[in-house]
Image (cartoon, coloured by chain):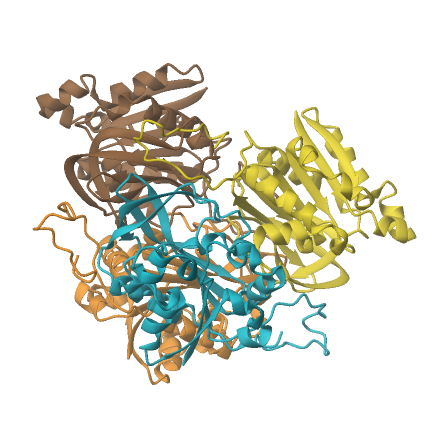
Chain colours: A brown, B cyan, C yellow, D orange
Amino acid sequence: MIRVLVFNEFCHERAEERIREVYPNGIHGAIADFLGKEEDFSVKTVTLDEVESITPALLAETDVLIWWAHMRHGNVPDEVAYMIRDAVLSGMGAIFLHSGHHSKPFRYLLGTSCDLTWRESDDEEILWVIEPSHPITRGIDRAIILPAEETYGEPFVIPTPDKLLFIGHFAGGEVFRSGCLYERGNGKIFYFQPGHESYPTYYNEQVQTVVKNAVRYLAPAYRCPSACPQVRHIKDEQYVMHAQSEF
Amino acid sequence: MIRVLVFNEFCHERAEERIREVYPNGIHGAIADFLGKEEDFSVKTVTLDEVESITPALLAETDVLIWWAHMRHGNVPDEVAYMIRDAVLSGMGAIFLHSGHHSKPFRYLLGTSCDLTWRESDDEEILWVIEPSHPITRGIDRAIILPAEETYGEPFVIPTPDKLLFIGHFAGGEVFRSGCLYERGNGKIFYFQPGHESYPTYYNEQVQTVVKNAVRYLAPAYRCPSACPQVRHIKDEQYVMHAQSEF
Amino acid sequence: MIRVLVFNEFCHERAEERIREVYPNGIHGAIADFLGKEEDFSVKTVTLDEVESITPALLAETDVLIWWAHMRHGNVPDEVAYMIRDAVLSGMGAIFLHSGHHSKPFRYLLGTSCDLTWRESDDEEILWVIEPSHPITRGIDRAIILPAEETYGEPFVIPTPDKLLFIGHFAGGEVFRSGCLYERGNGKIFYFQPGHESYPTYYNEQVQTVVKNAVRYLAPAYRCPSACPQVRHIKDEQYVMHAQSEF
Amino acid sequence: MIRVLVFNEFCHERAEERIREVYPNGIHGAIADFLGKEEDFSVKTVTLDEVESITPALLAETDVLIWWAHMRHGNVPDEVAYMIRDAVLSGMGAIFLHSGHHSKPFRYLLGTSCDLTWRESDDEEILWVIEPSHPITRGIDRAIILPAEETYGEPFVIPTPDKLLFIGHFAGGEVFRSGCLYERGNGKIFYFQPGHESYPTYYNEQVQTVVKNAVRYLAPAYRCPSACPQVRHIKDEQYVMHAQSEF
């Protein structure tokens, strides 16, 4: 059973009627809904109001964290962001969606500004598969067509992805590295661009397929905290060859 | 002085009037023309008819090889392709343009099929800069707009580029990794997608800027052939610590 | 069931008594032996004498190919090497062991000379795990100690690995990138340095663990040949969005 | 003229007689000394006592920052660390030496813990060149031999380097990724492992060559701050195609 924790800021949906109409139960509700139908997933949600409930204990019981946020990145305490960073380095998977590119945990994990260019013009987006054999693109044909999305454009100030899985084509002219996979410490990170709050993107079955694939791909086989130990000579009798999960 | 050798198949221009009108002196002529105006470049050209003149001696005197070909990849002898591969591994730079993605030297250097999808529809292309601080994109603003180009699409079956410098946006819906940089052995390889024979792409000043930047970036500081030597213990009196340029 | 094909040149073992004593059934025999004990593997072997039996049909029924060779790389026909390259690009996994670094299929897949420096001094090797969370290093503690191995040294003329999993430390002073993972097309390639013919390396349980891990990691989820198709506009009624496995 | 700023904690040298004997003018003094002999460098130094003097204005006038620190990483204010991170993303080069692997600016730029294993045993280190054609290894033969250094070992919890330039071999058995190059935003980062405070490493001419090479390689061609601008359609009359240095 893969334990998924879905974080959503849950601000737009409460502040604006037009967003609430798209996601009456919040974006986290919509995501938890389609994830919850998978027999191998157990799903919890948490919103910004409950951000204090994100603790090392909760993260230790989380295999994959999904993060959607936009307006209130600054309201996530640094200590929570560092806690998430450390959990990822220990092995937890983390999926950052759409405007989560500017969230603290994502920026702290990647180290760059994660800036991009953007425009809201109801542009159609065609999301092309770059790596057809990758487990995260499985079940997707050559592309996903989204009738309207917020336009994100390059340059996207990120480290070169370990693997670039999707590039988005926006009708207004832009392109964007829309699916970026990273390995950091013992954990994996996936950034996936679709999902502006004003569009019903998370009801799209192909988008759901990608998120479900990513959850399965990012779920860790084991967890191991980082350390900086002083060691003996490898042939010293007192040298302890710790198992990976303990050292 | 950077010594540039421009290879062009020179088939389309002789076979078709409409292509000859675009490139009356051949694509190699057009490229040599704008490169020749640079004071730090000395430029030679070679065509498929003269392919036998590509020798190790010529390549040893070449800093950067530029390769345009399309119809007759198979007419380049394997031994010439291997000669070019080995020259790149020794340090020579190589720029492969447009349909050169399927040329033997490019495929042999990268090891993959270098297949892609394509369409000829006079699509407008917007070539976005992904890495604004890279020497090869210097002088280019956020994008180059080409009124019409052959459409190339993903998946492009290449190794993940060491650095992705441009992504192309085609009006018909496709995206393409249009500027890909590789380091192999002591040499550098740049693939640049624009330049279908039926469009006046190589007269575009921004395209010319990219090619000139690439020539300067790929020019090697030194050359050194690859070897697989048997060595002594590093502290053996008879151990010879060869200078890089000799070992 | 993962279908493994083990190729071994099988020259040293027949030419030299001291090698035959180490591997009385050939290196392929020793490898097939420990792989054959796994319930999820079915194992076949093939030697250089039978190289003509390597056909597209055989490779189509192979999930992971293991390749050991040293003295007679040139006796493998180019057409067989290309066949293997294309099978890997379609999705087949390939593990190249030790002196397989200079084999045609490995060099053709990577594009570089794959040269290195070497010495036969019975050096002890300590093989350090660089990525403790990777599936291929699972079950290995911080390092594998091999009492004696052929010394391989840098520079190793390979493309930067997609993931560097092991670095070898030789008592005589050398280091070597001993475990290198690549993704090429739809397939994965793993190079693993240990296994000189004169040492009983393939009887080492930890080395066996790495090879077994690699077989499982490289086994493909599906196969799909490479192609360079002309396509229609994505919105053209006659556009066919081929499934990945067919296009 | 390349403007270099050398930061040194300057704690060990004042606290311990045996360290002061090695570096009577501080590690920063020793580094500034050999850098200052280069005609194209202008060198300033700053120590932890003066950390408040590190301002955006100072960094804007710095091409390459060199950072040595060990005991008091926590005394560098977060705001200074972020300032350095942002300067690097804008284009400033940064060289982190030895125990600087655990400094805030390095960790914040890379996003990982940068943990490693270590031992102080006066081990001899052989620093092997992995990429002989890279500008940073120019002038170095196959390896640098250091009679004694602090032993650093894997796993080193860093993102896969964009380019691995050196691997260290320690007499006690360890290996370490000792020269790691990263590109982040518009800037470059080089981590170089040698230089424990108790050994005269920075008087070694080959180590000096590497540091000087790195300064020249990391010096930026231009600087450009990161931004996340809202943009118009690229064909909108009011669209402004900003020059790279301004957008």
Q: Nearer the viewer, residue B200 or D41?
A: B200
Q: Nearer the viewer, residue D234 or D63?
A: D234
B31 horizontally vs A155: left or right: right
Q: Taking the image as drawn, is residue A238 in sight?
A: no
Q: Residue furthest left?
A: D238
Residue C48 higher or lower than D245, as above or below? above
Q: Residue furthest right?
A: C17
Q: Position of residue D177 (x, y in %)?
A: 51, 58
Residue shown at 42% from the left, 27% from the top: A213
Q: Taking the image as drawn, is residue A208 in sight?
A: yes
Residue shown at 70% from the left, 63% from the top: C118
Residue shown at 51% from the left, 78% from the top: B61
Q: Position of residue D163 (x, y in %)?
A: 46, 59
Q: Nearer the viewer, residue B1 or D197?
A: B1
Q: Position of residue D154 (x, y in %)?
A: 54, 51
D140 horizontally vs D104: left or right: right
Quarter where residue A87 is shown: top left
Q: Position of residue B176 (x, y in %)?
A: 36, 46
Residue C81 higher or lower than B138, as above or below? above
Tag count in the figure? 0
Q: Nearer the viewer, residue D149 or A168?
A: A168
